[in-house]
Amino acid sequence: MVQSNGGTQMKLFQVDAFADKPFAGNPAGVCILNDIRPDGWMLSVAREMNLSETAFVTRQRDAYGLRWFTPKTEVPLCGHATLASAHILWEEKLEAEGTTIRFQTKSGTLQARQAGKRVEMDFPARRVEPVNGDNDINESLQVSPLRTYNGTYATDGDLFLLEVESEDIVRRIAPDYQRLLSTAALAVIVTSRSSSSEYDFVSRFFAPAAGVNEDPVTGSAHCYLTPYWGTKLGKKEMVGYQASQRSGIIYCKWTDDRVWIGGKAITMFKAELLA
């Protein structure tokens, strides 16, 4: 059951998501709202936090409204900030341990549940279609993909998924972000099979057009990666590793049109937002 957190000041948190130790994974802001705030105000808070995403959580009767903002724009889906939001609702005792949390979002109803020390989230599975390679994207990343795919990332932009030959190539990418910004891509996933038996695949995620040059660990990218690698590997359960500088581990379960994405989270700080 959704409970009131009381008081008039809004709570603001920073959480390392998809992390099992501090200063790892992907940091997200979480703002627990007492009432609806204008879009421009939420964007200003996201700019103040200056993280890849800040989540805004609003109490509803039997669920929570959830929206995500980068320092530049609102995005339709964000995994790590959803994980961070659920983590805070349980940790702050706004929801009882073991409760399944429902979020109403621009990507439909999402659910989060506890699985031991992990948070698991129910997200839509996203498909990509094969396309011809895009030279501008390839050159901005200095890669020669084995295969290139395209999918919808948001209503106003395209996502490209590039499969490359090895994990070493994924790790060594040093993008020209200014050049990538001028391409057709709102977001780019670069991925390969893992060279380690610990993980099934590795990836990195770039989205300078959305205000995030490289996202450290991207839950929403695994809405595409899970069915993609699940089909190639013949698996329903996989472990992904995002090979950014901070890095993170994502546990994935694929069930037809849905993906369960799991990981751990650590609260780094909490504060009262006075503005």
Image (cartoon, grey):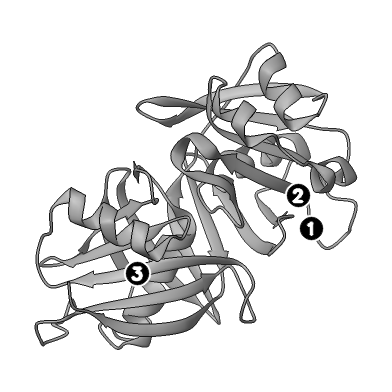
123 is higher (above) or lower (below) than 274: above
Which of the pair 268/248 is nearer the observer? 268
| Picture coordinates of residue 208, whole percent (x, y) | 53, 38
Residue at 67% x, 18% y is 136
Give the labeled residue for mark 3: 30
96 is higher (above) or lower (below) than 165: below
In the image, what residue type sits under mark 2? Val
Give the labeled residue for mark 2: 202
Q: Are marks 1 and 2 in contact (CB under 8 Å)?
A: yes
**Direction from residue 122 to residue 213 in the image, left or right:** right
In the image, what residue type sits under mark 3? Val
Residue at 56% x, 44% y is 221
User: How much space separates mark 2 and mark 3, taking CA atoms?
Assistant: 27 Å
Q: Secondary structure at mark 1?
A: loop
In the image, what residue type sits under mark 1? Tyr
Mark 1 Cα shell of 10 Å, populated few (<14), some (14-19), many (≥20): some
- Location of the C terminus by quadrant is bottom left
Which of the pair 214/203 is nearer the observer? 214
Between label 1 and label 3, give the one nearer the viewer: 3
**Direction from residue 9 to residue 213 in the image, left or right:** right
Residue at 57% x, 21% y is 183
**Direction from residue 162 to residue 25 in the image, left or right:** left
